[in-house]
Amino acid sequence: MRARVAAGVLILVASGGCATVKDTLKTTPDTIERPATGLPGTFLRADGLPNLGTVCLTPLVDPQDKSTLDLVRTIRGGQGDYRVTAGKYGVGDNELLRVDCTTARPMGVVRVQ
């Protein structure tokens, strides 16, 4: 009897975790709204070196003017959405800059949902 109760609790906990993950994915936009502007070819790590890993780092640095980008969220496929200074790269209110974390190359502007 105890084994059945434990199994039932385990199933409920596991299914609740899946529901949470699904809800989180719904709030992450899959599409890029538009291209960003005035971008460097690639961003750098905080120490000034190129990103050679697969992890989304924070902060990233723009080598053109040394401004920083702060990671807000990571999404599947090795991409990250970064907060930038308002107006920079054409990113407006309620928008983020999507970056390919494996290359640190900018991808475009996404809307915050």
Image: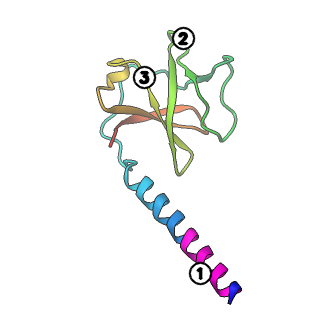
Q: Identify residue for label 3.
A: 84
The mark lying in front, picked from 2 and 1, is 1
Q: Which residue is nearer to you in this view: 51 or 29? A: 29
Query: How many C-alpha atoms fall within 10 Å of the one at disc 1: few (<14), some, or many (≥20)?
Result: few
Q: Which residue is nearer to you in this view: 81 or 113? A: 113
Residue 71, horizontal then vertical, whole percent: 52, 32
Q: Mark 2 or mark 3, which is nearer the start of the sequence?
A: 2
Give the magenta range.
3-14
Q: Identify residue for label 1.
A: 8
Q: Tell whether position 77 is magenta.
A: no
- Tell me which residue sits at (49%, 58%) in the image: 21
Query: How many C-alpha atoms fall within 10 Å of the one at disc 2: few (<14), some, or many (≥20)?
Result: few
- Tell me which residue sits at (49%, 21%) in the image: 40
Q: Secondary structure at mark 3?
A: loop
Quadrant for the C terminus, please.
top left
The mark lying in front, picked from 3 and 1, is 1
Q: Secondary structure at mark 1?
A: helix
- Tell me which residue sits at (59%, 81%) in the image: 8
106 to 5, vertically: above or below: above
Q: Secondary structure at mark 2?
A: loop
